[in-house]
Amino acid sequence: MIDLLAIAAHPDDVELHVSGTLLKTVDLGGTVAICDLTRGERGTRGSGELRAEETRQANRAMGLDEANRWNLGIPDGDIRITEENVLHVVQALRHFRPRILLFPSQHDRHPDHENGHRLVREAWFNSGLTAVESTFNGTPQEPHRPELLLMYAHSWEFEPDLIVDISQQFEKKIEAIAAYSSQFSMPGQASTEDANEPQTFISSHDFMEYIIARMRRWGFMVGGKYGEAFQTLGGPLKVNDLRTLL
């Protein structure tokens, strides 16, 4: 069992939006894993092979063992709620057995993010059912359903229910994002806008400046420098001891 599993539609989504929280969890003695639904092979820039190498670089930047990052190989741009896809996610949930699950919010400009949200919710429920059977490397898996579901935003924002202060993890997060040089223009680096590839919504310096500004705003809201925001799913959180909120 691990503390936290982050599921994302594409390689680089986790790095952009929740890697600071993963890094902080590890810094505090916790355990984490990542599951990417697709290889991002239909992206305008780069290729599935290049993004796989960039993911390995990002893993090294985060200090993440490759055994703790799965890619389910669902076709990019075609995330559907099928029995096969649900079972793939169920296998990941039952293998890692996280207490907390981070996954995309239900509203975003990219259909893969919205469809990824729906797929994960379906799999989360099925993963707890004894009647849903799954195996890993030929061994039957036991049912498991994460206790806490937290959604993270992509381009379309939401009103946060909680914010994690990632001020101490910010630099390492930026290093992990920078591994995806085919996708992003990082502050202080040459712009990918000059590359011989089509430009996209995320390849400009403006996009990364927006991502950083949003982290600054969320950090400011909780008295820190940088933050990552989440919404809860399923109603209010149960708190046994108010001191744990401090």
Image: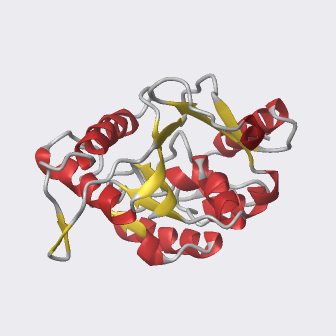
Quadrant (top left/top right/bottom left/bottom right) for the C terminus: top right
* Residue 109 % position (x, y): 44, 29
Q: Is residue 219 left or right of residue 208?
A: right
Tell me the quarter of the picture where residue 88 sits.
Answer: bottom left
Say left or right for 40 vs 60: left
Res 188 quadrant in image: bottom right
Q: Residue at x 31, y 43 (%)?
A: 124
Q: In the image, is residue 184 above or below residue 178?
A: above
Q: Position of residue 112 (x, y in %)?
A: 35, 39
Which residue is outermost to the front?
240
User: Which residue is rendered at x = 50% and y = 74% of the image?
Assistant: 56
Q: Nearer the viewer, residue 61 or 52?
A: 61
Residue visible at 63% across and 34% down in the picture: 239
The vertical placement of 114 against 1, above or below, is above
Answer above or below: position of 187 versus 111: below
Q: Would you say 121 lies left or right of 45 here? A: left
Q: Which quadrant of the view contains residue 98?
A: bottom left
Q: Quarter of the image containing the N terminus? A: bottom left
What residue do we see at 59% from left, 49% from top? 18
